[in-house]
Amino acid sequence: MPVNLPAKQIYMLNTISGILFFLASAVTSLVTPVNFQTMVILTLIVIVYWLLAVTFTGLYKTSRNMKQIHLKTLISIVVIMIFFAFQQLMFIKIPFSASTSFFAFSLVFLILLHVMYFRTRFHD
């Protein structure tokens, strides 16, 4: 049975995801030499890509279990990371170590969000 969340819950999850991306940005700015103001550019771009990925993959509408949610999240983050790497080479001057750390923190935070949010829905 698909998740098929109502629009209000999808907006809430997307808002929390955006906040978690900013948290990942703040943590990245603490562990890398890149300052937070520079990381905000990366964060805003990634939030737009994340919203597109959620829409294209049907993450909160068509997923049937936690494994699908985690797989779609992982694939989305990897695709976003690849697209951002191309942008990073051409336009944005952020070190690859900072962007890699950012995406790693983001993936961990998103997986934790999904585990906490969907644990009762998919509990066997």
Image (spheres, helix red, strand yellow):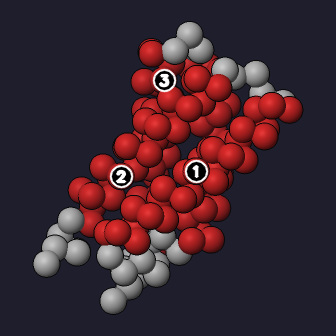
In the structure shown, which secondary structural element does the residue marked by tag 1 occupy?
helix
- Please name whichever residue, 89 or 35, is drawn nearer the observer in this view of the structure: 89
Dot 1 or dot 2, earlier in sequence? 1
Residue at (44% x, 64% y) in the render: 71
Q: Which residue is mark 3?
A: 28
Residue 118 in the image, given as x and y percentages of width and height: 27, 66
Mark 1: amino acid: Val
Quarter holding the C terminus?
A: bottom left
Quarter holding the N terminus?
A: bottom left
**Residue 23 image-quadrant placement:** top left
Report the Cα–Cα distance between label 1 and label 2: 14 Å
Mark 3: amino acid: Thr
Residue at (33% x, 58% y) in the render: 114
Dot 3 or dot 2, earlier in sequence? 3
**Residue 64 image-quadrant placement:** bottom left
Direction left: furthest residue: 124
58 displayed left or right of 45:
left
Q: Tags 3 and 1 in contact by the CB under 8 Å rule?
A: no
In the structure shown, which secondary structural element does the residue marked by tag 3 occupy?
helix
Residue 97 in the image, given as x and y percentages of width and height: 58, 23
Q: Which residue is mark 2?
A: 111
Q: Tags 3 and 2 in contact by the CB under 8 Å rule?
A: no
In the structure shown, which secondary structural element does the residue marked by tag 2 occupy?
helix
Q: Which residue is mark 1?
A: 78
Above or below residue 116? Residue 43 is above
Report the Cα–Cα distance between label 3 and label 1: 18 Å
* Circle 3 crowding by C-alpha within 10 Å: few under 14, some 14–19, many from 20: many
* Circle 2 crowding by C-alpha within 10 Å: few under 14, some 14–19, many from 20: some
Residue 98 in the image, given as x and y percentages of width and height: 57, 24
77 displayed left or right of 117:
right
Mark 2: amino acid: Ile
Residue at (41% x, 82% y) in the render: 4
